[in-house]
Image (spheres, rainbow, N blue to C red):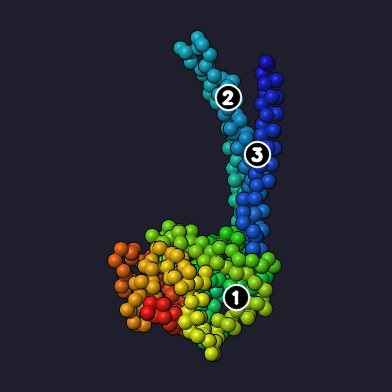
């Protein structure tokens, strides 16, 4: 085969490889749903990067493979040296300038996307995000009175939000894949992260994305993106009494225990609640004979007393700050009831 023909073949194979790889890259849904306006520009950025980098990858790898095959050593050439080459200044300038131009162009584009995504918006809702081994607490400040606390994140649709992210102990990372954004939660420091929810309702995971200790993998929560009216109703309910007038505190406590927001049942077995977790002590057995004060301490300051054979520090430390006082009272009432 002549050199020209083999080059044509190589170029043809390269084009086929580019088309096939781009088709694979574009046909697979790599990402979770897009739940923020920022997510759309991040995904667009990704696709532009994909379009630029696949041909470059194929070109570079293709030249490497072609050279290995074309200039391979043949029998009888073991003792031969290659021809003395000084180099080619023009070629070197070209193959430095083109990648440099591409790199700068992509970096500029990324910068434009980043600054657009981080731009301050009007009517921003402030949400305080606090990481603590191994749970998140979300706080909604009001113009007066205390913040409304929650163990799960609730946001209205089509709402610009600014998160003020910090940590009470070690470095965590606040990550919502559906928003395509994350930032570190650093103790002693407050970082802002801006997100604008889009019109899409749904529940998406909140994930700690920084190895932060034994319970790192369990440091997850949920974000509920709901219509504004529903959000207002949720907020009103959060600000009202945890135990509605006339309700049995133990019944509310059982609901709190089994809810996904607290996740108590994921770690503790209670026959009455039909939970089967084994990370922490089975409570109807271990709480037997303990009074309300002990139960309350075990919820709000779990490291004050840790049952033998169970790991220290795995139980979230933030129930005291993330739950309403009435919810804790209800939990205590329920746990007292089942441990009797
Ligand atoms: Cu917090 Cu990992």
Helix, strand or loop under label 1: strand
Residue 76 drawn at (x, y percent) = 50, 9
Q: Quadrant of residue 140?
A: bottom right
Q: Quadrant of residue 328?
A: bottom left
- Mark 3 is surrounded, within 10 Å at the Cα level, by few (under 14), some (14 to 19) or many (20 or more) other residues, namely some
Q: Nearer the viewer, residue 138 or 93?
A: 138
Residue sitting at x 36%, y 67%: 281
Instruction: Compare marks 1 and 3 and give the one earlier in the sequence.
Output: 3
Q: Quadrant of residue 296?
A: bottom left
Q: CA distance from mark 1 to mark 2?
A: 58 Å
Residue sitting at x 43%, y 73%: 318
Instruction: Compare marks 1 and 2 and give the one earlier in the sequence.
Output: 2
Give the residue at mark 2: 67
Give the residue at mark 1: 125
Residue 219 drawn at (x, y percent) = 46, 63
Work out whether 70 lies above or below 107.
above
Give the residue at mark 3: 21
Q: CA distance from mark 1 to mark 3?
A: 42 Å
Residue situated furthest bottom in the rendering: 245
Marks 2 and 3: which is nearer the front? 3
Q: Is residue 121 visible?
A: no
Residue 79 drawn at (x, y percent) = 46, 12
Instruction: Compare marks 2 and 3 and give the one earlier in the sequence.
Output: 3
Residue 314 drawn at (x, y percent) = 38, 65
């Amino acid at each position: 085969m002549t050199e020209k023909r083999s080059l044509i073949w190589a170029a043809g194979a390269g084009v086929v490889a580019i088309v096939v790889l781009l088709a694979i890259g574009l046909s697979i849904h790599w990402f979770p749903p897009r739940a923020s306006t920022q997510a759309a520009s991040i995904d667009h950025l990704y696709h532009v990067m994909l379009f630029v980098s696949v041909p470059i990858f194929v070109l570079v790898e293709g030249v490497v493979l072609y050279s290995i095959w074309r200039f391979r050593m043949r029998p009888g050439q073991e003792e031969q040296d290659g021809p003395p080459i000084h180099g080619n200044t023009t070629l070197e300038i070209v193959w430095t300038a083109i990648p440099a131009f591409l790199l700068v162009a992509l970096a500029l584009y990324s910068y434009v996307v980043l600054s657009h995504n981080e731009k301050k918006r009007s009517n921003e809702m402030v949400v305080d995000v606090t990481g603590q081994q191994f749970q998140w607490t979300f706080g909604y400040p009001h113009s007066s009175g205390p913040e409304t606390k929650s163990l799960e994140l609730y946001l209205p649709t089509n709402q610009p939000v600014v998160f003020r992210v910090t940590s009470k102990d070690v470095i965590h990372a606040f990550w919502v894949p559906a928003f395509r954004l994350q930032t570190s939660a650093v103790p002693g420091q407050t970082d802002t992260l801006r997100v604008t929810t889009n019109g899409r309702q749904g529940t998406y995971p909140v994930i700690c994305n920084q190895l932060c200790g034994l319970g790192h993998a369990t440091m997850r929560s949920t974000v509920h993106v709901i219509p504004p009216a529903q959000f207002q109703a949720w907020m009103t309910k959060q600000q009202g009494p945890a135990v509605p007038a006339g309700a049995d505190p133990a019944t509310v406590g059982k609901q709190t225990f089994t809810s996904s927001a607290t996740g108590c049942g994921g770690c503790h077995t209670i026959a009455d609640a039909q939970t089967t977790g084994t990370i922490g002590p089975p409570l109807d057995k271990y709480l037997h004979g303990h009074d309300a004060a002990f139960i309350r301490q075990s919820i709000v300051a779990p490291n004050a007393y840790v049952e033998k054979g169970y790991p220290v520090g795995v139980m979230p430390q933030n129930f005291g700050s993330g739950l309403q006082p009435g919810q804790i009272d209800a939990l205590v009432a329920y746990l007292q009831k089942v441990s009797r």
